[in-house]
Amino acid sequence: MIKRHPEPLLWMLFSAGGVLSGMLMPILVLLFGVAFPLGWLAAPSYEQILAVIGNPLTRLALFGLCVLSLFHWAHRFRHTLYDGLQIKHLNEVIALLSYGAAVVGSVMAAYLLWQVS
Amino acid sequence: MGGSHVYSDYHPRWLRRKLSTYWWLEKRAYVAFILREGSCMFVAWFVVYLLLLVNSVVGGPGSYARFLEWSATPWVLTLNIVSFLFIVYHAITFFVAAPQAMVVHIGHWRVPGVLVLAGHYVAWAAASVFVSWLLLGA
């Protein structure tokens, strides 16, 4: 019997999350996190942002971005804790907490994006 | 695994050297590595921030305005400026590694790594322009 190991799947999620967050996050942080608060650019009005987020394609893209980025984080965080702090004996606990957090975050993202109308 | 292990017959002393918890401060390359790995924390923070934004939009015009105000408070602004730097570093380091992870073939021709990397940068630029247009243009 072939024992299936989850690592390749987790690596795929990690990789996809790295690419997607790399493509989309810098501009989003720059706009919402820096340019709008500092007044360099005018933030979208409520009607504009509602129209953008209300579009099902935007919500699908945001959902993908959130889920993949969270699994990207979970994978990297888990491995960094192993290597950086050398706490391999806490393997299962760390994996459970990091991927668990990613699952919880994904469910919350789905719930919130579902609420937009 | 250090000095607590005493040699006895049939129980040889551990050969592995105990590594300091701060091993990654020893060399610049190690620091770069840990910064790259650490950058994922800012990716996670930004997911939280995005979800707070969506939540505020769900809450109506008042809560969206409060979200924008909250974003301008010093600690959130500082956190987001630092996040921006780390997220850009995160993106670049990830794209630079892409040619090693992705072997692209067109027919029998293997696409050189430089082109794979260039493709990522072009897509990154296009995505940034598109998002800006979506949020600022219409």
Image (cartoon, coloured by chain):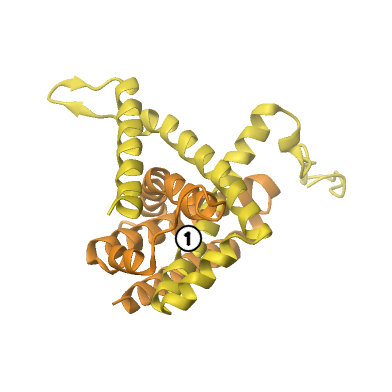
Chain colours: A orange, B yellow
Question: What type is the residue that disc 1 sits on?
Answer: Val
What residue is at 36 percent from the left and 48 percent from the top? A20
Of residues B123 and B1, the one nearer the viewer is: B123
Q: Position of residue A37 (x, y in %)?
A: 55, 56
Circle 1 residues within 10 Å: few <14, some 14–19, many ≥20: many
* Residue B77 drawn above or below residue B109: below
Q: Mark 1 — residue?
A: B47
Q: Residue at x 35, y 38 (%)?
A: B124
For residue B133, side relative to residue B3 (left or right): left
Q: Nearer the viewer, residue B41 or B19?
A: B41
Front in this rendered view, residue A74 or B69: B69
Q: Is B6 situated above or below B117?
A: below
Drawn side of residue A104 relative to residue A55, left or right: right
The foreground one among A10 and B17 is A10
Q: Quadrant of residue A69?
A: bottom left
Q: In the image, A81: left or right of B60?
A: right
Q: How many marks?
A: 1
Quadrant housing residue B19: top right
Q: Position of residue B98 (x, y in %)?
A: 38, 33
Residue A64 in which image quadrant: bottom left
Q: Quadrant of the C terminus of chain B?
A: bottom left
